Amino acid sequence: RFIVLCGKVQQTMAHHYTTKWSSGLLDCCDNISSCCYGFWCCPCLACTVSGNFGENRCLPLCDILSPAITASCGIPLCVPPAVLSMRVAMRERYGIKGSLCKDIAVSCFCEWCSWCQMHRELKYRKKNPTVINVQPMTTFLCDS
């Protein structure tokens, strides 16, 4: 939807969270190859997920490097930024139910499981594409 307010175009989106993750956070046995990939080389899996989602493949390196860099500046960092941002972006794109609070908790305490879950989700979405019906709506509210 697009709304024009005095010459400025603003885009509004109605979020309808209708689906759940295709597999649970701890459902590694649903896809043994993803589980093994994440167990033996989680940084490689994270880079694969990031690239397959359309982001820079090096994005997960922020989770590895950022704690050391911010700590050297005296700023503690608890939440891994890449896994959190990817998780939120994936939920938004696919309309998956959840909350930022849950995403933060999962990112902090189950980072590897989160990357594995996102990897399974991308595989699932590739097999079962999501159809999104978007209808633009324009509203003019200015007299000029």
Image: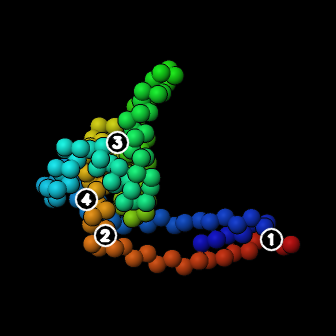
Callout count: 4
Going 31% across and 62% down the picture, which residue do you hit? 122
Foreground: 73 or 78? 73
The amino acid type, in three-letter code, at marker 1 is Cys
**Residue denoted by label 4:** 120
Give yes or no for contact between labels 1 and 2 (Cβ–Cβ under 8 Å). no
Query: Would you name the residue on which mark 3 appears?
Result: 107
Residue 20 falls in image quadrant: bottom left
The amino acid pointed to by label 2 is Lys
Question: What's the CA distance linking mark 1 and mark 2?
Answer: 44 Å
Say whether residue 69 is left or right of residue 64: right
Which amino acid, mark 4?
Arg
Of the residues tagged 1 and 4, which is closer to the observer?
4
Residue on which the image places disc 1: 142
Residue 44 point in image, percent of width and height = 29, 47
Q: What element carries label 3?
A: helix
Which of label 3 and label 2 is nearer to you? 2
Q: Distance between the residues labelled 3 and 2?
A: 24 Å
